[in-house]
Amino acid sequence: MNVGRIHFGGDLVFGTLMLVLDDLSKKFDGELLDLTVLDLLASRYELDQTLAPTWNRLLQPDTAYQFLVAVANGYQIKCKSILTHFRTRIEQIVQDHLDPHLQGRSREDLIAILDKCMAEVDDGNLAAEEYHIEVDERALESPYDPDYESEQYYEHQNRLEIDESYAEMSRYNAKIREDATRRRRGDEDAEWVAFWQSARKVASTGPTEHFRIDLYHAHGSDSTPNSWSVFNY
């Protein structure tokens, strides 16, 4: 294939990228996930340096967080409430990394940011335990919570003292809730770790098979909010 004096051989993808990538990088205003996929494609042909100005412009704390939201949506991961809980801390980690890197940003910076976040997941600033504590504290705001000091609370306490069957049933129900909470925490902890692994893989090698893109929200489509597309990279 020849365009002007440029010879592309038989690779139409390479030829197309050579023609449009520079102009596209200057006008690109998509999301960070879109830029990541474009960068991965360009890197196959050693053209990813063309996107450096785009990374300098688009890689920001808020866009990095939206990248994580897109990954969670794409893989339909259920730990989005934990992600929301830690938004401020995640964006601070991003900012701390970007401050010394005002220029020359790239997909490698996104990967480095994800690595820093992953290092905080087990027992650092992004450990799910803090989220669990907050959820459990909210759950205590019920008539049976001593801090609630409601009429139902005092009635409950009185029945515990005079009605052994009621007390036994209360202990039984408390044990069920405790077991359910332990299972929920374990499931959410495992999913939280898996989420970060998935996010790093997307940044490193792209979305895998069955990654789903919300066409309605991602691109302003006129299709219904339940319209999805399966991504095959």
Image: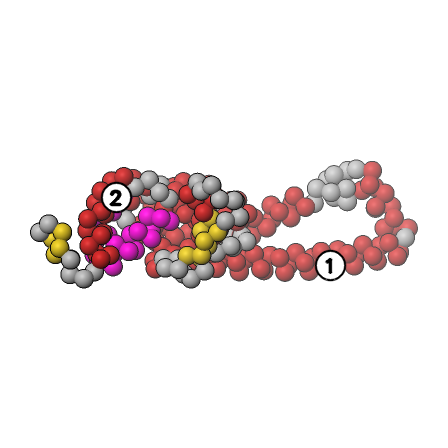
Q: Residue at x 30, y 41 (%)?
A: 28
Using the image, tell me which numbered label, if any, was put on residue 24. Answer: 2
Q: Bounds of the magenta span?
A: 33-54
Looking at the image, residue 172 lies above or below residue 61: below
Quarter of the image with the C terminus in it = bottom left
Where does the image place residue 140, in percent across and percent down from the top left? 70, 45
- Viewer can see residue 155: yes
Q: Residue at x 74, y 39 (%)?
A: 148
Camera-side mark, 1 or 2 = 2
| Membership of 183 in magenta stretch | no
Where does the image place residue 154, in percent across and percent down from the top left? 83, 41
Q: Residue at x 40, y 40 (%)?
A: 62
CA gap between label 1 and label 2 equals 57 Å
Q: Residue furthest left?
A: 5
Q: Earlier along the polypeptide chain: callout 1 or callout 2?
A: 2
Looking at the rendered structure, the secondary structure element under dot 2 is helix
- Viewer can see residue 125: no
Task: Identify which residue, 215 or 61, lies in the foreground.
Answer: 215
The image quadrant of residue 178 is bottom right
| Membership of 45 in magenta stretch | yes
Instruction: Say whether residue 115 is left or right of residue 172.
Output: left
Where does the image place residue 44, in percent across and percent down from the top left? 25, 59
Give the amino acid type for the residue marked by disc 2 in the picture. Leu
Label 1 packing within 10 angstroms: few (<14), some (14-19), many (20+): few
Q: Are marks 1 and 2 in contact (CB under 8 Å)?
A: no
Looking at the rendered structure, the secondary structure element under dot 1 is helix
- Report the residue marked by disc 1: 176
Where does the image place residue 30, in percent across and percent down from the top left? 35, 42
Q: How many dots with numbers?
A: 2
Q: Residue at x 83, y 46 (%)?
A: 157
Task: Identify which residue, 133 or 49, lies in the foreground.
Answer: 49
Magenta stretch, main secondary structure class: helix
